[in-house]
Amino acid sequence: MKKLNRVQLGLASIAIVAAALLAQVLTPRELMARASASLDLQTVIPKKFGNWALIPDISPVTPADPEGYVEPDSNSTRIYSQEVGRGYSDGHGNIVMLLVAYGPVQNYRLKAHRPEFCYTAAGFRISNKFGAQVPYRDGAAPIKLTRLTAERESRFEPISYWMRVGNDIATGVVDRQIIRLKYGLRGLIPDGALIRVSTVGLSTEASYKLQDQFIRDLLAAIPQQDLKFFTGT
């Protein structure tokens, strides 16, 4: 019995050492963020494009504060190296709010900016979540995004968003983890970006129609060399 225990102990020790070595070998070490990190989103995202013009003093909901202000030492600033929140008008009284957040290291904390989390933290109720696609350019694959609605008191806010992980678009939590694993097996640590648009004061159908047009106009205005940041490959 003692001899058997020694054999089992030896095998267990070998397994532990092998697992540690394998984990060391498979640990991602190379950041993909170098090209994206050099972008200045405040400059890349135009303040005027198509029929849309920037409206000062309108900010989207963020995790740190329901009014849109983020404290300098907040969790949001630790997760993201850049964050742009703006409001745009189409000149006909319709307003679309845009949030673009970039994190050079895509990890589990990126979920903090997903509307399911940040709107709930701001006191909203989330409902009617579903997937959709928005064609934005001839010859390009449509953007796969998630849609949902956020409600708080009299405020009704339909939302569309998508997440870029490395060179891929993630449509959900499981999808995001699979993409991270794919890059991890290649020794790469992907960066990540969240692009979110929302509207207030319109019906659900009208909101998503307006948001689709905004997304198409925005991506058409982004310089070709910077478009990959928003759409992946």
Image (cartoon, rainbow, N blue to C red):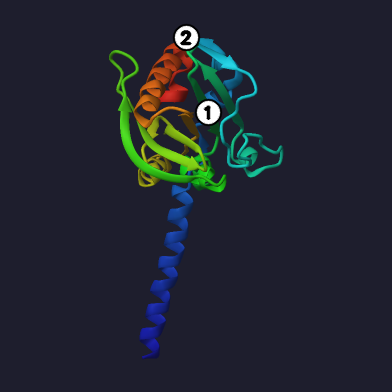
Question: In what element is the residue under mark 2?
Answer: loop
Residue 178 lies, in percent from the top left, at 36, 44
Amino acid type, residue under disc 1 in the picture: Val
Q: Eyeballing the image, is 125 above or below 58?
A: below
Residue 126 shows in the view: yes
Question: Which residue position holds label 1?
Answer: 100
Q: Eyeballing the image, is 83 above or below 65?
A: above
Distance (Cα) linking label 2 and label 1: 20 Å
Residue closest to the far left: 139
Residue 233 shows in the view: no
Earlier along the polypeptide chain: callout 2 or callout 1?
2
Amino acid type, residue under disc 2 in the picture: Asn
Residue closest to the far bottom: 1
Residue 17 lies, in percent from the top left, at 46, 64
Question: In what element is the residue under mark 1?
Answer: strand
- Pick whichever, 55 or 136, lies toward us: 55
The residue at 59%/40% (across/down) is 79
Of the 4 image quadrants, the one containing the C terminus is top left
The residue at 37%/25% (across/down) is 206
The residue at 38%/40% (across/down) is 179
Q: Is residue 196 left or right of residue 133?
A: right
Question: Which residue position holds label 2?
Answer: 51
* Crowding near the residue tagged with mark 1, few <14, some 14–19, many ≥20 C-alpha atoms within 10 Å: many
